[in-house]
DNA sequence: GAAATGCCGACAGAATCGGTCGTATACTGA
DNA sequence: TCAGTATACGACCGATTCTGTCGGCATTTC
């Protein structure tokens, strides 16, 4: 539990790969799939999803493929996960669309919602760029969002 | 994705319920199940799991049931989730027991492991007591673990 | 000894996930 | 224009996981 789906993982890997190859105009789904050894057709669908959510730009035809729609610094892991797996809540009851049948009795939900927000905040603070440069992250403190406050 | 299983939710609810009724010596699984309208047999198994992990004390026989093994303040949400759903990793590849087949190619895992730790830290900082007292959590800062550092 | 309770394993139904296939569509370049 | 390469999209299926149920047994109280 509390783990990324493989699809989200693939999606992040693909974006990271694109971020690492800024010189190329576009990379096809197959290129990326081959690079990591993941199912090409599955990755294709994932890339399409991200395209639909505005994270990627696609281009059909020969020498077509995908490219980042924005700077790698401006795409957060949160957005990727959101695009691929949809909205997520740590509470099992979705609360947004259709609340759980035992919503009135369960008072667990509310405090956990705050945990949920914290996690979302962490994920939002991570950009594709951060993933691409996997050098030693010892003393990085740029942009000030390296610290997440959790006032429970 | 990234959501608690219903079982973990139930488990937290049950512990919270026990924490709210410190006067009673023990509450049966059925008592708690009825209080929240959750399947009694399922909850029973969950309580047993938590007992096995040392979070609860059980007592068979008439007027038996469960009671907290420790003070509500000393039981973290992390422990509960761990006891019920087992160890969790945000990366889809478990990495501990049997690493994913594409471990060498995937460099996503390592940065995400740090996110994983952060989330675990947040969960560890939340006690059953915190859940039980769902008053306005405006100005609580006790014990100094209300702040989680995330140095990505 | 009977009733209430916890303990444990097996199992079935449902939902979700991972992955494949087929087909339609769009673009490129010769 | 036409062939080739690539995305777009929906249907589908097998595997896994999750949720919940059942049955039998052990333990304690009355
Ligand atoms: S389980 Fe649905 S409100 Fe908590
Ligand atoms: S998917 Fe297994 S190592 Fe990243």
Image (cartoon, coloured by chain):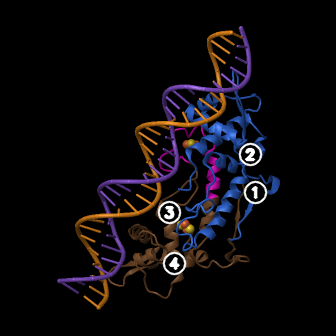
Chain colours: A blue, B brown, C purple, D orange
- B75 in relation to D12, above or below: below
Q: Is mark 3 within 8 Å of ligand 1?
A: yes
Pointer 4 and pointer 1 on the same chain: no
Disc 3: which chain?
B
The residue under label 3 is B6
Q: Main secondary structure of the magenta part?
A: loop
The residue under label 4 is B17
The 10 Å Cα crowd at callout 2, few under 14, some 14 to 19, many 20 or more, is: many
Disc 3/disc 1 C-alpha distance (Å): 32 Å
The 10 Å Cα crowd at callout 4, few under 14, some 14 to 19, many 20 or more, is: many
Boundaries of the magenta span: B92-117
Query: What SS does tag 4 mark?
Result: helix
Disc 1: which chain?
A
The residue under label 2 is A75
Pointer 3 and pointer 2 on the same chain: no
Instruction: Say which quarter of the image contains residue D30.
Output: bottom left
């Amino acid at each position: 539990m509390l783990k990324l789906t493989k699809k989200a993982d693939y999606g992040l890997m693909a974006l990271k790969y694109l971020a690492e190859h800024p010189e190329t105009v576009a990379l096809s789904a197959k290129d990326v799939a081959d690079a990591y050894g993941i199912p090409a057709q599955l990755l294709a669908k994932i890339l399409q999803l991200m395209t639909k959510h505005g994270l990627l730009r696609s281009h059909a035809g020969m020498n077509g493929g995908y490219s980042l729609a924005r700077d790698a610094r401006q795409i957060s892991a949160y957005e990727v996960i959101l695009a691929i797996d949809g909205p997520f809540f740590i509470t099992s009851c979705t609360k947004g669309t259709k609340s759980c049948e035992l919503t009135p009795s369960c008072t667990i939900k509310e405090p956990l919602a705050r945990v949920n927000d914290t996690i979302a905040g962490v994920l939002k603070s991570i950009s594709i760029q951060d993933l691409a440069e996997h050098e030693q992250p010892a003393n990085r403190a740029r942009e000030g969002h390296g610290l997440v406050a959790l006032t429970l």
